Amino acid sequence: MTCDRTFSFYPPCGFFASVVTGATVALASLTSPAAALEVRVVPDNPRLGDTLSVLVETDGSDGTAPTVTTGGRRYETFAVGTNRYRAFLPTTPLERPGMRRLQVSGDGTVETVSVNVGDRDFPIQEIWLSAETNAIVGTDYEFDRVDAFKQLVTPDRFWTGPFLHPSDGPVTTVYGVRRYYNGEWAGDYYHRGIDYAAATGAPVRAAASGRVALVGRVEQGFELHGNTVGIDHGQGVTTIYLHLSRIDVREGQMVEAGQTIGGVGSTGISTGPHLHWGLYVRGESVDPYPWQRLGLK
């Protein structure tokens, strides 16, 4: 099961080591020899749920990092080389497909880039809940802590290469599933992650290197999420691990990719032992699969 404050019962509990040659498309750049900014966006054919990686090259005359603005939201960029910067922009299943206008500001100029985000069909499930289960709404404490965790934007980048599968269990629910609950369409819900089925106590591993920024336990009020670990990978990228039977790390601890951080469980609101693993970019749940397949840098 999953966990998201946007729905009355379930909160959302449930790339790339470099800009990949052949996958990188220059969507817009100045044609003048005196061009101050060059902007590239990958993937070249994004769909809802994908992460947009925006790479900006400057002439260095300003000396400050460019910014990217879209949909009324401003994103800072982070240095990835000399006069080269990058920002990650999330897209989600709740958005409308179509053209996105990105305004990139830097070196005293503004470049506008248009990116078409394609539609995508997400699976639909019908879930029936008992009145007792449906009455569980979670606690302000757990929601406040999880919400604050997802908003972290640490300047350092801790991860390298593709993200790992955090569990050896089979995937039982994919990212983006839409649902009916007790016959009613949950219009603001989508499955914010991937569910892995595994035996209680089976190892849960960090998908990438980072800093443990959230540890939440049932006895502290994590009644929906269950025992929870959140890892900050830097630059607005975080992962969360829910329903754990045990927690093997502490807040503030640095962990390596593949390190065991806990065990699969069924704590919180859960129909059986499984791991719900979610990946967030700037506070929004995005499809983890491209991060596992290619690895974003």
Image: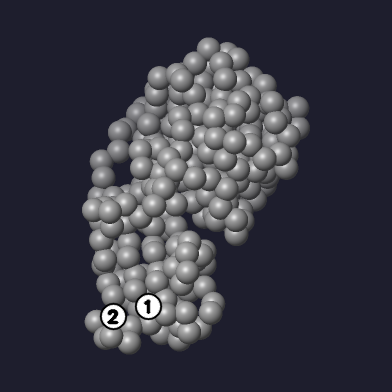
Q: Does dot 2 land on a helix, a strand or a loop?
A: loop
**Eyeballing the image, is 114 above or below 123?**
below
Q: Position of residue 276 (x, y in %)?
A: 51, 29
Q: Which mark is residue 30?
A: 2
Mark with earlier residue (2, 1):
2
Does residue 204 show up? yes
Q: What residue occupies the far front of the structure in this picture?
A: 82
For residue 125, what is the image quadrant?
top left
Q: At 28% across and 57% down in the image, what residue appears?
A: 24
In this rendering, would 29 be left or right of 193? left
For residue 243, what is the image quadrant?
top right
In this rendering, would 279 be left or right of 242? left
Q: Position of residue 268 (x, y in %)?
A: 62, 25
Does residue 266 show up? no
Tell whether label 1 touches label 2 (CB within 8 Å).
yes
Residue highlighted by disc 1: 37
Q: Which mark is residue 273?
A: none
Q: Position of residue 88 (x, y in %)?
A: 44, 57
**Eyeballing the image, is 154 above or below 130?**
below
Total labels drawn: 2
Colouring used for the render: one colour
Amino acid on which disc 2 is placed: Leu
**Eyeballing the image, is 148 above or below 216?**
below
